[in-house]
Image (spheres, helix red, strand yellow):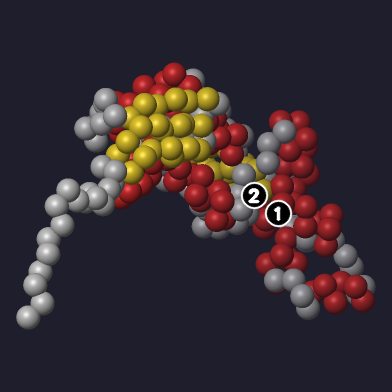
Amino acid sequence: MNALIKDVMTTQVLWVRKDTSFAAMASALRRYRVSAFPVVDETGHVIGVVSETDMLAKEALGLDEDDDLAGMIGGILHRKQREKAHAVTAEDLMTAPPVTVSPDDAVDHAAYLMYVRGVKRLPVVSDDGRLVGIVSRADVLSVYGGADEDIRAQVESDVVLSAGHPETITVAVKDGVVTLDGAAESGEIARQIARRVRHIQGVVAVRDRLSRQSAAPENFDVLASFSID
């Protein structure tokens, strides 16, 4: 069974209000070693996210408006990025609307969002948008720390047994890598089995060593002959 966000998320979350100062957030980054702050309103709803990358703009791009280099960079960088160099509060810095997940979302959904959006953490919100936790890349990757024996048992019960191959396929797991040995009726069935194993939580890779039985025999005991008229 795939892990859910609520299984790996952190419920103790460091959050900020939209009027929290830049200096206060910079101090909290150093003190608590976090990489982002959810920004919440007065009712606890997440309205944005401030990341350390957002805050780095002040140091990297905090140039005087009259500086020639500032004008050159200004022609290349997006207007929003330039504005963040002059931000003084969380509201000025935050990315909105925020990318969030639900406690009941699958962990692989969070992994996909982190990958395509290039973020390290995602706020976890309730159905009504209130902050209930946060999930990090380390939390997502923790699903790969499962015991090999547990993975093997799940592969055997969820894939091999359900596919009707308990006696023809053997399963071995080492450091999350699953090796499938034995025989399958066809190449397509073997591919389906390997594909299902790859989607099991905690599987790092699959070594498909299944032999493929031909759908039709290649040798015939009797050859048909036809007369040519």
Q: Residue furthest right?
A: 67
Q: Which residue is mark 1?
A: 54
- Residue 64 placement: quadrant: bottom right
Q: Which is more toward the observer, 193 or 101?
A: 193
Which quarter of the image is occupied by the N terminus?
Answer: top left
Q: Residue furthest bottom?
A: 229
Q: Is residue 173 left or right of residue 75?
A: left
Q: Which is more toward the observer, 13 or 184?
A: 184
Q: Secondary structure at mark 1?
A: helix
The kind of residue on which mark 2 rests is Val
Q: Is residue 194 above or below residue 218?
A: above
**Badge 2: few (under 14), some or many (20 or more) residues near its Cα, within 10 Å?**
many
User: Residue at 75% of width from left, 67% of height from top?
Assistant: 82
User: Residue at 17% of width from left, 48% of height from top?
Assistant: 221
Across and down, in percent, residue 28 comes to 73, 36
Asked if disc 2 and disc 1 are in contact, CB closer than 8 Å, the reply is: yes
- Residue 162 placement: quadrant: top left
Q: Secondary structure at mark 2?
A: strand
Across and down, in percent, residue 203 comes to 47, 34
Residue 184 shows up from this direction = yes
Q: Which residue is mark 2?
A: 50
Across and down, in percent, residue 116 comes to 55, 56
Across and down, in percent, residue 153 comes to 36, 22
- Residue 224 placement: quadrant: bottom left
Residue 215 shows up from this direction = no
The kind of residue on which mark 1 rests is Asp
User: Residue at 87% of width from left, 72% of height from top?
Assistant: 70
Q: Is residue 91 above or below residue 196?
A: below
